Image (cartoon, rainbow, N blue to C red):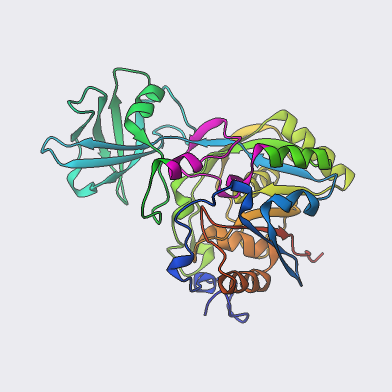
């Protein structure tokens, strides 16, 4: 079974497998952000355009919701007492999923985990002058709780010692690639992965959208490392979804409420926005301004209440994100779109091309 098997069980992990030629995994961003390709996916048609044409594809009264999170330079390479290299990826403070520049205790992904036992001290800088991290607890799946000893504030330390945590399938990182792994409207630090659907936007394109009459509003969801992890279970019901911190400010909540009351479309830029908005209304019954967490796992049959259209990239096989877009647009529709994308040589994953999806009609 797989994504292209219409008889496949929509709640089976194997139903979200598909074959992708390795050469279609984008290793570099497009030369110009908005010159990437955009597949417009409706229930019965596929249209192939350029992302810069987005303004004419949206309605003048649409509300476009952006995630203005900023990727943190959270990957740290240091030296163990033996002289060997160690690497930590700071995920979140020990006591919260929300980024805190004053926190010194962090949950981190550690490599090589087997050599980073409790008490191990890792130094940063040529002679350790940038600071150190001490492993305080060993956690499952290569995670560690670490305590930072820094001579400067955390954000200054990360500027000097840290790098952006590019996706694991990027084989040849470079300064240019790292610079492009950030949206033009990134503002609120906290993510360890970019909201990749937003990487296609330029400031000029945002201006074109507003001149078209599209309303823009912004929320924040801190993208976690779980975005890269495949489903580890066969039944979706058994999948434990990672939680992520999000914030909907009052002005965004008000804009969404106005749009829904007026019957206007809410267009989410990225699955992160979908999770934040749908998680919010599922918990509170309406969109409320709040800073909290969501572990919502959207699967087929989910009753979408906020998002009417979605801009998203092409996702990894057996990923929770592929399940989400299949629930949103219909698995057969997504299967046809992915098959077409492979045939036409679309670029996949973080630096790849994009889709504009309309929500599948929901039964009453």
Q: Name which residue lies at 37% across and 19% down.
A: 153
Q: Name which residue lies at 57% across and 55% down.
A: 297
Residue 258, image x, y percentages = 84, 38
Asked if residue 193 is among those painted magenta in the image, a careful observer would answer yes
Up-down relation of residue 342 to residue 71 (above or below): below
Asked if residue 167 is among those painted magenta in the image, a careful observer would answer no
Up-down relation of residue 214 to residue 337 (above or below): above
Residue found farthest to the right? 262
Report the front residue among 255 and 311. Answer: 311
**Left or right of residue 171: residue 53:** right
Residue found farthest to the front? 31
Where the C terminus falls, by quadrant?
A: bottom right
State the image quarter where residue 283 is shown.
top right
Q: Examine the rendering and report whether any part of residue 109 can be seen.
A: yes
Report the front residue among 9 and 342. Answer: 342
Residue 222, image x, y percentages = 53, 39
Residue 293, image x, y percentages = 56, 39
Q: What stretch is highlighted in magenta?
A: 176-203
Q: Name which residue lies at 61% across and 51% down.
A: 271
Residue 91, image x, y percentages = 41, 39
Count up the numbered dots.
0
Report the front residue among 332 and 61. Answer: 61
**Left or right of residue 174: residue 146:** left
Up-down relation of residue 234 to residue 36 (above or below): below
Q: Examine the rendering and report whether any part of residue 306 can be seen.
A: no
């Amino acid at each position: 079974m797989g994504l292209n098997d219409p008889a496949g069980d929509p709640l089976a992990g194997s139903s979200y497998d598909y074959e992708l030629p390795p050469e279609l995994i984008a290793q570099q961003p497009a030369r110009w952000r908005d010159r990437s390709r955009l597949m417009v996916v409706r229930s019965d048609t596929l249209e192939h355009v350029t992302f810069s044409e987005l303004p004419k594809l949206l309605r003048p009264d649409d509300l476009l919701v952006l995630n203005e999170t900023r990727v943190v330079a959270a990957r740290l390479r240091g030296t163990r007492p033996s002289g060997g290299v160690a690497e930590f990826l700071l995920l979140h403070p020990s006591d919260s999923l929300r980024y805190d520049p004053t926190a010194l205790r962090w949950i981190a992904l550690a490599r090589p985990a087997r050599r980073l036992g409790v008490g191990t001290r890792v130094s940063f800088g040529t002679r350790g002058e940038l600071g150190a991290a001490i492993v305080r607890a060993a956690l499952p799946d290569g995670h560690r709780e670490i305590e930072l000893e820094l001579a400067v504030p955390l954000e200054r330390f990360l500027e000097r010692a840290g790098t952006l945590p590019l996706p694991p399938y990027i084989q040849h990182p470079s300064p240019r690639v790292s610079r492009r792994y950030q949206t033009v409207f990134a503002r609120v630090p906290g993510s360890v992965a970019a909201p990749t659907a937003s990487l296609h936007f330029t400031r000029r394109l945002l201006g074109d959208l507003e001149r078209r009459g599209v309303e823009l509003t912004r929320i924040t969801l801190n993208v976690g490392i779980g975005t890269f992890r495949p489903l580890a279970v066969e039944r979706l019901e058994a999948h434990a979804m990672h939680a992520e911190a999000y914030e909907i400010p009052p002005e965004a909540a008000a804009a969404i409420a106005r749009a829904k009351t007026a019957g206007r479309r809410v267009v989410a830029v990225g699955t992160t926005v979908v999770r934040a908005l749908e998680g919010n209304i599922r918990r509170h019954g309406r969109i409320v301004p709040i800073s909290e967490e969501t572990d919502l796992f959207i699967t087929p049959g989910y009753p979408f209440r906020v998002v009417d259209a979605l801009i998203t990239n092409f996702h990894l096989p057996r990923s929770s994100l592929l399940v989400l877009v299949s629930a949103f647009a219909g698995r057969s529709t997504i299967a046809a779109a992915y098959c077409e994308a492979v045939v036409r040589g679309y670029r996949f994953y973080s630096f790849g091309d994009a889709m504009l999806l309309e929500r599948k009609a929901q039964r009453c």
